[in-house]
Amino acid sequence: MQNLKRLSDQDSSSISLFQKRILAERAASPNPETFISSHPALSKYYVGVDVGSGSTRACCIDATGNILALSEKIISKESLKTNFVTQSSTEIWEAVCHCVKTCIREADLKSTDVYGIAFDATCSLVAVHMETGESLPVGPNFKNSDQNIVMWQDHRAGQEQILINSTNHSVLKYVGGGMSIEMELPKMKWLQNNISEAEFAKYDFYDLADFLTFKSTGNKTRSLCSTVCKQGCMAPGIEGSVKGWDDDFFSSIGMQCFVKNEFKQVGGSAETFLTAGEYVGNLTKEAALQLGLSSNCVVGSSVIDAYAGFLGTVGANINVDIPALQEIDAMEVGLHKAIGRLASVAGTSTCHISVEKKHGIFCEGNWGPYYGVCFQELFMFEGGQSLTGGLLSHVLTTHPAYLQLCKEAEEAGVNKFDFLNNRLEVLKDEKEHKSVVALAKHMFFYGDFLGNRCPLNDPHMASSIIGQKMDVSLDNLAITYLASCEFLAQQTKQIVTNLKQSGNNIECIFISGSQCKNGLLMRLFSDCTQLPIVVPRYIDAAVCFGSALLGCAAYKNYRKFYHKDISKLAATSILKNRESDFFADRSPSPYTQPSATGKNLFGAANLPAPVAKTNDYFGSVSRDTISPVDPANITLGASNSSSLAASISRIDISEERDNLARKKTAGDHLWQVMTDLTGTGKAIMPNSLDHPDVQILNVKYEIFLDQQNIQRDYRKRVDACMKALCSSMQ
């Protein structure tokens, strides 16, 4: 029997309580073979699409959260000049269509079986013609309109970033005090500075995920996730905002053109923008044909890829008791149960996302509070590391012993990371150390090869390695790899500490991405942060899975708020003939998690004492005075845009009451989908504080901070010298 057999074949420790209930109900049914006929919702399927930096993926899930198929296609990027990285939206859309069609075919579904679809993507900027929707060039080759995406990795807009941040505008306190060079507004400003005013007026700007909903529905409505997190928008109600865009801020950076055209080029008034999983529209006939789906399929409001990873992991049950989370669960209801759960979404880079119901929390160096970007009532915070999976790849591939590693790992029949982890265990025994961590005790690896995203927001940060010798052996590669893993864990600790010191409640980290398979890395994360690390049911597919959940939520919201005649939709489907197909035999899902933990290798590290805040708007509100948000009457932020340290003031949200209720209910639907379909994650618990390795990791964390501070100090001293020399020569 197709999907329920598939579900029952899986390890019961990995499925959700909802899934267990479905299996129990079927087992208790007088006619298990016809169980589906009394549960028509189980014959609905949903698709999620994830566009990463180097590939596009699609997955198809059933109504219980099983991934039935997963497909992937590589996408290219172009870098004609240093700091310029572009992509093609035409190529990406073609890859999306290929992946969705492949996914549906491999899941053995028909086009009418899929009821909802949603997209996530990297926070890259797409430029199309305001009237025609055709691609427009973004440089450096302005003759090539096919290259119409400025990637998040693109660092061309350094001067524009400096200009924006020099305004010290109150808008900036929602991005940790300054916009990152990776965000989209500096890139828009760069384009304004490098093409004519008349040409610039033709540009319609989308975050990549929003472009995909536009491409699939023809609807230009943007998402709060993309515009609030990356484009300088403030959700309606924040700082008295109604339209979301601050005229004074955009005028101060020389973008009066946006103000004059009422922000038409970035979607217009934010009153129409949608929160995660809301119904955007149905697939157009053209898009449905290209995707291999039906125009009855609804499209959910998109999110940035890291937020899809958040949605695809934090709703999970956990296989062990975590008292702090149990206390939150007992106190909170519905989607507020997400509080305390940090998502670390790992890939080439890593984003760390937390959620809070408190207002007045600001976190210097980390982004947020972002209101309503996933759940209408809650605020989200984001921190990030610019290079994580890419760092490990760089460390391995640039070492002289890399080819030897490839050869010996292949001969051993294991992947490179497992081989290195095993080699470290052998080295530990040979050197008679009590644990692996001591092997890198005198190597101090600082790995900001691509600058620092959070909490420094410093694109000029670089790497530094103290303790290198002329040893080019495979063993040296293993120890250098260990030191780079330690760096990633220590930097995660710094971001988590910064979030917690600002008032965020973080009790557990839900991590996703292929790095979950690396037991050594997960152990370091847990011990350095002193938090449980939860590895999700779906490791490599967690982000794509999160988008599929949005597709499911969009369909539920569509039924509740938009669709007036469900019978017409049912009539066009094949529900009455689906029972035999639904219970067809399939092999167990290949996408569920393997065991990600090995031996208990490491100790734990104490969190450092709180550091003093440099800007008082990041710490101006006593945590004792913070009360839960009333969505109808919100308190947040500075009312005087000329002062970042202005007092908190109470303002009224001007949104329509029924619109607010719709968004609130949309979030409830999304949270219910997340908790029902996500499954159970496996927790790695931190070692105790008295573990011998704790002292080493603790000392090395202080050295990590020293390396960070010393590098910045060295740059300032040399820059000051050069400035003085230049002045003396004039």
Image (cartoon, rainbow, N blue to C red):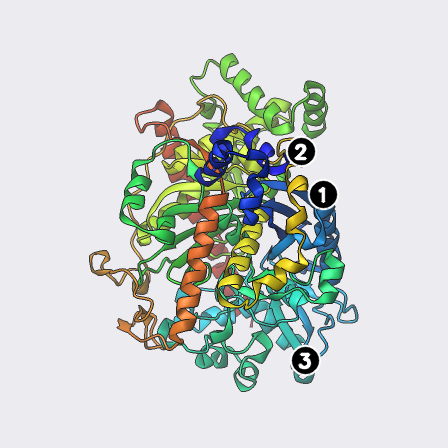
Q: Nearer the viewer, residue 14 or 458?
A: 14
- Residue positioned 24% across, 56% down in the render: 623
Check disc 2: other Cα within 10 Å, few if <14, some if 14-19, many if 20+.
some
Q: Distance between the residues labelled 2 and 3?
A: 51 Å
Mark 3, residue position:
202
Q: How far apart are marks 2 and 1 (CA)?
A: 10 Å
Disc 1, SS? loop
Using the image, determine if residue 654 lies above or below residue 303. Answer: below
- Residue positioned 48% across, 22% down in the render: 436
Disc 2, SS? loop
- Which image quarter holds the N terminus? top right
Residue type marked 2: Arg
Rendered image: mark on residue 349: none
Q: Which of marks 2 and 1 is nearer the N terminus?
A: 1
Please tell me how many numbered marks the rendered image carries.
Answer: 3
- Mark nearer the viewer, 1 or 3: 1
Residue 121 drawn at (x, y percent): 60, 56
Q: Distance between the residues labelled 1 and 3?
A: 43 Å
The residue most toward the front is 30
Check disc 1: other Cα within 10 Å, few if <14, some if 14-19, many if 20+.
some
Check disc 3: other Cα within 10 Å, few if <14, some if 14-19, many if 20+.
some
Mark 1, residue position:
108
- Residue positioned 44% across, 74% down in the render: 167
Q: Earlier in the sequence, mark 1 or mark 3?
A: 1
Using the image, determine if residue 471 lies above or below residue 365. Answer: above
Residue 321 drawn at (x, y percent): 34, 33
Q: Which of 710 and 82 is in front in this view?
A: 82
**In the image: residue 605, left or right of residue 516:** left
- Residue positioned 66% across, 46% down in the render: 578
Mark 2, residue position:
586
Task: Check contact, mark 2 vs mark 1: CB within 8 A.
Answer: yes
